[in-house]
Amino acid sequence: MIRYPKPLQQGDTIGVTAPSSGVDKVLHHLVHDAKQQFEKRGFKVDVGETVWTQNKAASAAKEIRATELMAMFHNPEISAIIPPWGGEILMEILPLIDWEEINPKWILGYSDLSTFLFAMTVKTGIATAHGPNFVELRSDEWEPVASQFLNVLKAHEGSSIEQHSSEQFQSKWQHEAPNDPYVYKLDSPTEWKVVGSTNIELEGRLLGGCVDTIRHLVGTPYGNIASFQKKFLNDEPILWYFENCELNAADFHRSMLQFVYAGWFENAAGIIFGRSPAGQEVGGFTVLDSMERIKELTGLPVIYDADVGHVPPQITFVNGAHGHVIVEKGKGRILTTFR
């Protein structure tokens, strides 16, 4: 049975820690701006020491990162944890986490943060939220799709949240652009697509993250999907969602084949892929070629170009929750039920 954290309430404290990458000094203003925006909306913010440092591809030594993260889970004054952003080597801290001692509370993020989110849900059965990072919430207005993370974190067990695909997405990052009023600069029309079809309807337990990082959990204690389904899902099928940060088409395909051969898709309802800034073709082989082959190999329906990942905005996907996804004429919607 999936356990859901206590709903976030106005006046609660958000903990900000960096279990992957911290923030270089020249970008500290991004953290201050995001902190101010949460405070304007009635929340308190507790920023950890790891947020302010960055060395050798991580915020701090793995022991320090793990200790600060666990301290926030144990701190009764902190109601949710939102790291500043992702990074590269969060995987280092996984063996240092006392999974049996984690107090259920929301943790939100994506990219390398999905490494922890995925492992936490698979190991403990506690729901986690794949959505915007802290520094992306630094503007006066929160983009309508991305801002749904707050409704997710405020949801009560037994309730449902409906989210809809964006009208437009941002084709490339513009970190220097002013926040007037949004961080995101949406410039391209959104269209959710289905391999071999136009419309589709899928249901299953949501699970996924960044392919670049969670693929390395295959064969580890943090990627035992069969055990997770049996222990926490009563063998319900998984509705997978993935996003690709940096993999070219061939590397992406090898990663998907690894999931297939590891048995991750043996009891699944389908696969949802987010838009990607990567996926460069290799010798004429494209990511769409890979998706078509994975569909043929597994027999699973495949949705792609969805609002998830490194090409904003993104819907908040809840690992462990029940998802009902509908795609009609290029538009998508997902009903997340906390049961």
Image: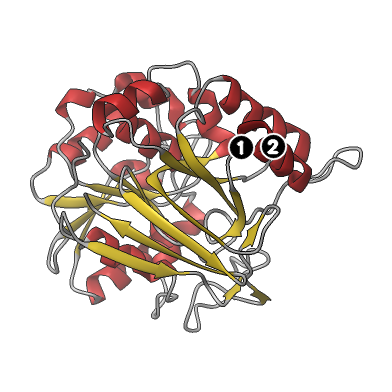
> Is residue 92 shown left or right of residue 228?
right
- Decide: few, some or many residues near mark 2? Use Cα within 10 Å; few <14, some 14-19, many ≥20: few
Q: Residue at x 57, y 27 (%)?
A: 259
Q: Secondary structure at mark 1?
A: loop
Q: In front here: 209 or 171?
A: 209
Q: In the image shown, does 44 or 219 lie closer to the viewer?
A: 219
Residue 290 location, x and y as percent?
73, 39
Front position in the image: 84 or 119: 119
**In-image side of 322 versus 261 (left or right):** left
Residue 16 visible in the picture: yes
Task: Identify which residue is drawn at 15% across, 59% down.
Answer: 156
Cα distance, mark 1 to mark 2? 5 Å
How many numbered dots are placed on residues in this image? 2
Q: Percent x, y for residue 66?
A: 30, 29
The residue beneath circle 1 is 299
Left or right of 244? Residue 152 is left
Element type at mark 2: helix
In this rendering, is residue 338 above or below 290?
below
Whether residue 222 is visible to the viewer of this picture, yes or no, is no
Circle 2 sits on which residue? 296
